[in-house]
Image: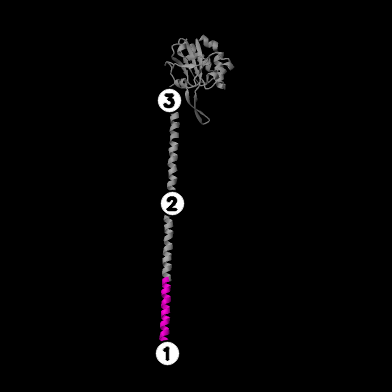
Amino acid sequence: MTVKKVMKKSVKKAAKKTASKKSSAKKAAAKKTIAKKATAKKPTAKKSTAKKTTVKKITAKKAPTKKTTAKKSPAKKIARSTSKIASKASSKMPVVGQPAPDFALQSDTNGTVSLSRYIGKNVVLYFYPKDDTPGCTREACSFQENKSKLITSDAIVIGVSPDTVDSHKKFRSKYGLDFVLVADEDRELCQAYGVWVEKNNYGKKYMGVQRATFLIDRHGRVAYVWPKVSVDGHTEEVLHELSRLG
């Protein structure tokens, strides 16, 4: 074999090796490109999942807001309803010249007391919040101290509160009261005379008795109304109006 032939074979082998290396390099590069593309696609899938999760979270937050609104609205309706009831109760207060609402309720004397029983006499019907409290005690004692003057005016006194008969008995005994105390436990008489109203004590609202007095003449008609009584000097005001009735 000649030198030229040997040289040609060597060149061909070298060329084949180079071609083989290039082919391997291309294949490796192609694999890397495919791997990069696959890696690039995966984060996109994660991003879309993240978006879906966010939407779900927002929807979940909105749902309770609707429920909370639904819970609050009935409470507001109840508050408005209570205010309307209170205002209606006040508007029912009898006016001068109107027949006084009759009643038949238990008293501290263990008997039933009715207004119609006293037709022919003047009646001082007064409503007070509670037995044996400072203002109510002063008011009751003032009527008791002026009993002789009330008798002269041909008038009787009837006190009304939501207290029980037993509570009235203790109140009467403790202060030596000599007039009838009616137990309006169901507040029906208070409502009939419009004195069961909404009150406000240091921001706290509640239903209670508004201190009021009604002077009822011999014919059972309302002669005078004191819708919001101030205890001091009240008995003198009642005696003055009684003197005008004659």
Q: Position of residue 1 (x, y in %)?
A: 41, 90
Q: Please identify the quarter of the rendering in which residue 92 is found.
A: top left
Q: Secondary structure at mark 1?
A: helix
For the residue pair 8 and 39, the one nearer the viewer reads as 8
Is label 3 or label 1 in front? 1
Q: Nearer the viewer, mark 3 or mark 2?
A: 2
The reply to whether dot 3 and dot 2 touch (C-beta < 8 Å) is: no
* Place of residue 35 in the rendered image (x, y in percent of width and height, measured from the top left): 43, 65
Q: What amino acid is labelled 2 in the image?
A: Thr
Res. 131 image quadrant: top right
Label 2 crowding class (10 Å Cα cut-off): few <14, some 14-19, many 20+? Answer: few
Mark number for residue 214?
A: none
First along the sequence among labels 2 and 1: 1
Question: What stretch of residues is rendered in magenta?
Answer: 1-27
Residue 85 position, x and y percent, is 44, 27
Q: How far apart are labels 3 and 1 at the CA level? A: 130 Å
Q: Nearer the viewer, residue 228 or 117?
A: 117
Residue shown at the point (44%, 59%) measured from the top left: 43
User: How far is disc 2 from disc 1 in space, using C-alphas?
Assistant: 76 Å
First in sequence: mark 3 vs mark 2: 2
Q: Which residue is mark 3?
A: 88
| Residue 78 seen by the camera | yes
- Choose between 56 and 129: the one closer to the eye: 56
Dot placed on the residue nearer the N-terminal end, 3 or 1: 1
Looking at the magenta stretch, what is its main secondary structure? Answer: helix
Q: Secondary structure at mark 3?
A: helix
Task: Identify the residue at image location x=41%, y=69%.
Answer: 30
Q: Which of 207/98 is in front?
A: 207
Callout 2–callout 1 Cβ contact below 8 Å: no
Circle number at residue 3: 1
Looking at numbered disc 1 in the image, what kind of residue is underneath it?
Val
| Residue denoted by label 2 | 53
